[in-house]
Amino acid sequence: MTDRECTEFLQWCLPRLRLRWAGFRKVRRQICKRLTRRLCELGLPHAAAYRTYLSSHPNEWKTLDTLCRITISRFYRDRGVFDTIGRKILPTLAEKALTDKEPQIRCWSAGCGSGEEPYTIHMIWRLRVAPKLDSDLPIRITATDTSRILLDRASNARYTGSSIKDLPTKLRDAGFVKSGDGYTVRENFKENIEFLEQDIRSESPDGTFHLVLCRNLVFTYFEPTLQSEVLERIVRKLVPGGFLIAGIHEKIPGGIADLVPHEKTPGIYRLESDNVSKKGGGSSGYASPPAHPGDVDG
Ligand SMILES: C[S@@+](CC[C@H](N)C(=O)[O-])C[C@H]1O[C@@H](n2cnc3c(N)ncnc32)[C@H](O)[C@@H]1O
């Protein structure tokens, strides 16, 4: 499949999956490779034939949906964000939880990939935040993703050197055991993390959260109305005073007046009160979207 043929096909099919071309533009080649393989499996000569196939085989749309997932991630991705989470956000949440006599900090990593993000949070908590507290307040992390394969990798917790290259040395040394040519997360960092297979378009984990990370997924790849629907659901899951972390290049939809940018680190928002249903107004975001939002995974 040529680049032009694939681009035209994606511009046709992505809106039908409630996804947005602008998010995929920079990363389209990996999707195009998968599409070419799929056409081969089905014995179809070109994208037009695949379009016809889709109209006569409605179930194929589910397969196409899974082919359109970008799965790139790594530990401590976007250093400034995790520095801020460790220096300011988790300590603020811990202080409030202790004042409110809460038994734990609850975090949701939505679109957790192979576990890089939830393990990073746990390492920061145990190695940087918890030692400074006058209490043994635990963190509980719920990590969700729609891919069973990635969730199994997350449970195995074995990674290549390139996955952990952005981690500060102290976290890397304390967080992993070297095994062969890979690195395995130490057992104590696997505690208190639950991995769940969930599609964020229709599902969310039970309970409420002090911290939600939803990075490089909804606000890059989903079409605007779906972004707003998912954002509203996420905000209902946040406790008042809780934080939402989006990707550093992502702009979240406006309309939730109490979700306000926090300090100067792009992608960090705080829910100021529990009134989350206000509509109207401008954007809550201040980060300009990149020319091609797919840059985040490019
Ligand atoms: C680009 S990765 C981002 C991983 C991580 N959040 C980060 O920023 O490094 C996007 C992740 O979202 C997952 N994903 C895609 N569509 C999803 C959906 N509808 N519901 C839940 N997870 C989804 C993918 O499987 C992938 O693991």
Image (tube, helix red, strand yellow):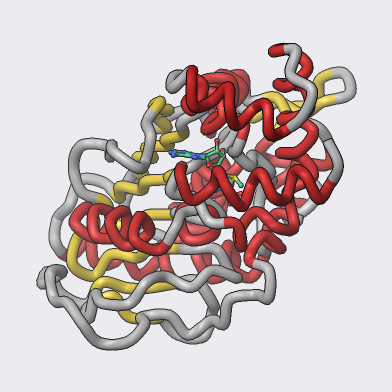
Where on the picture, by quarter, is residue 226?
A: bottom left
Number of marks present in the image shown: 0
Q: Position of residue 121 (x, y in %)?
A: 51, 49
Above or below, 83 against 283 in this view is above
Q: Residue at x 17, y 52 (%)?
A: 102
Above or below, 171 against 53 in this view is below
40 or 96, nearer to the observer: 40
On screen, residue 53 versus residue 274, left or right, reads right
Above or below, 222 against 49 in this view is below
Q: Report if residue 271 is visible in the image.
A: yes
In the image, farthest residue toward the right: 181
Above or below, 251 against 133 in this view is below
Q: Quadrant of the C terminus?
A: bottom right
Q: Residue at x 26, y 46 (%)?
A: 104
83 or 177, nearer to the observer: 83
Q: Residue at x 31, y 53 (%)?
A: 230
Q: Position of residue 106 (x, y in %)?
A: 30, 47
On screen, residue 215 versus residue 284, left or right, reads right
Q: Quadrant of the N terminus?
A: top right
Q: Position of residue 168 (x, y in %)?
A: 73, 56
Q: Residue at x 58, y 20 (%)?
A: 149
